């Protein structure tokens, strides 16, 4: 059985600091600074001024967002709960003698929540198309929709989940590698992997109504939604929130545990106000706070892989669909011959 090790990634980010020209005048004082912080902590920022030049003021920024201003060279205390998770590039803009110089240091901000491990009960086991390279899975109006991948084989389909029968199916053009799917305002959205485009369909007829370009040069992996945004992953530790009407970026979060960032976020599902994400190549699902990216829980599904037919094309766990009628969760994998209905134990 494959053991899940979501918390074993080591952060390699190290503190670094330097100043722009003229050199050797100022540095951000690194005394007491660490490589990794949590949101419940604070830091004190001050300029190292070895030549004792008269400083008028220092303005501090984190990733180009202003944190505050210190008069002369007084220290400035920053509460880290105002920052987003991830690498914090701290810049100090030092004003002196009618001139200015900038200094930079950095550290990593991780979550202060240790994820809890969830247990589940297997409710039902259903047949699943063994040739479906599952990329997206979602219920809409009681019907299970599935998007599959592989160039020349990618599809969009409706399925009778109780029998595994495909009731409607269209193929994507062979140049496209299908990825995640979701619904918004009764429209069906589908991503592609490396083609940097997505499609919007009529969910009843599968008629393609629009093709849209991605908002930046990224890959398309997972897709879900809440009542306001499309929510997208690209295989990194970043989750993007998009305007469903324009498909443009509104905001993003980085996903972290209390020890590390969690990369290769794949298929997504919105369940009870949280983002559920398959982690590629892992037999587990991360449950993520959509406000800050903290992994609050982990669902280990490794035992399910022993219940499917083992064959050369069998691939990783992928596919999460919440059925609001039964209040249960459906999961499967790429080229799995089974789909499983589960519920989370209290």
Image (tube, grey):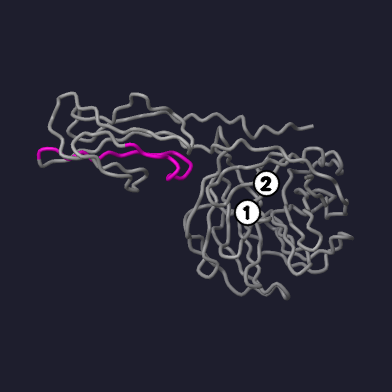
Left or right relative to 337: residue 180: left
Q: Quadrant of residue 173?
A: bottom right
Comparing 202 with 224, the one in front is 224
The kind of secondary structure the magenta stretch mainly shows is strand
At numbered mark 1, what does the secondary structure look like: helix, strand or loop? loop
Q: Which residue is mark 1?
A: 222
Q: Quadrant of residue 176?
A: bottom right
Tag 2 and tag 1, C-beta contact below 8 Å: yes
- Residue 184 disc label: none
- Quadrant holding the N terminus: top right
Q: Which residue is mark 2?
A: 278
Task: Tell me where residue 2 appears, x and y as whole percent.
Answer: 76, 32
Question: Is residue 99 covered in magenta?
Answer: no
The residue carrying pointer 2 sits among few (fewer than 14), some (14 to 19) or many (20 or more) residues within 10 Å by Cα, namely many
Comparing 316 with 27, the one in front is 27
Task: Tell me where residue 262 appears, x and y as whole percent.
Answer: 58, 39
Comparing 132 with 91, the one in front is 91
Question: Is residue 92 covered in magenta?
Answer: yes
**Residue most toward the left?**
97
Task: Tell me where residue 133 appears, x and y as whole percent.
Answer: 74, 52
Please give the range of residues in magenta.
77-97
Q: Residue at x 61, y 29 (%)?
A: 8
Task: Tell me where residue 38 appears, x and y as whole percent.
Answer: 49, 35
At numbered mark 2, what does the secondary structure look like: helix, strand or loop? strand
Q: CA distance from mark 2 to mark 1?
A: 9 Å
Rendered view: 193 above or below 96: below
Comparing 8 with 334, the one in front is 8
Left or right relative to 272: residue 345: right
Q: Earlier in the sequence, mark 2 or mark 1?
A: 1
Rendered view: 197 above or below 305: below
Q: Residue at x 61, y 52 (%)?
A: 221
């Amino acid at each position: 059985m494959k053991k899940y090790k979501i918390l074993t990634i080591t952060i390699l980010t190290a503190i670094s600091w330097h100043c722009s020209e003229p050199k050797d005048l100022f540095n951000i004082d690194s005394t007491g600074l660490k490589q990794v912080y949590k949101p419940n902590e604070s830091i004190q920022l001050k300029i190292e001024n070895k030549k004792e030049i008269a400083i008028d003021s220092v303005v501090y920024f984190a990733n180009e967002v202003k944190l505050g201003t210190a008069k002369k060279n007084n220290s400035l205390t920053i509460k880290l709960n105002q920052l987003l998770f991830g690498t914090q590039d701290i810049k100090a803009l030092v004003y002196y003698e009618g001139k200015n110089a900038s200094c930079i240091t950095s550290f990593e901000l991780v979550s202060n929540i240790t994820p809890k491990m969830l247990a589940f009960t297997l409710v039902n086991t259903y047949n699943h198309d063994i040739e479906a390279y599952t990329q997206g899975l979602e219920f809409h109006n009681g019907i299970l929709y599935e998007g599959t991948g592989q160039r020349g084989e990618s599809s969009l389909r409706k399925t009778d989940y109780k029998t595994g029968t495909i009731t409607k199916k269209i193929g994507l053009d062979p140049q496209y590698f299908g990825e995640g799917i979701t619904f918004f305002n009764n429209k069906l959205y589908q991503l592609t992997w490396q083609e940097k485009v997505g499609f919007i369909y009529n969910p009843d007829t599968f008629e393609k109504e629009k093709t849209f370009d991605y908002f930046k040069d990224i890959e398309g992996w997972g897709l879900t939604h809440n009542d306001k945004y499309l929510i997208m992953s690209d295989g990194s530790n970043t989750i993007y929130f998009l305007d469903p009407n324009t498909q443009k970026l509104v905001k993003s979060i980085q996903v972290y545990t209390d020890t590390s960032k969690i990369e290769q976020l794949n298929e997504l599902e919105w369940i009870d106000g949280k983002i559920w994400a398959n982690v590629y190549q892992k037999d587990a699902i991360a449950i993520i706070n959509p406000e800050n990216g903290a992994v609050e829980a982990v669902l280990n599904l490794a035992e399910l892989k022993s219940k499917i037919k083992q064959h050369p094309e069998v691939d990783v766990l992928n596919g999460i669909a919440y059925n609001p009628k039964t209040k249960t969760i459906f999961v499967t994998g790429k080229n799995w011959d089974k789909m499983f209905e589960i519920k989370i134990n209290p």
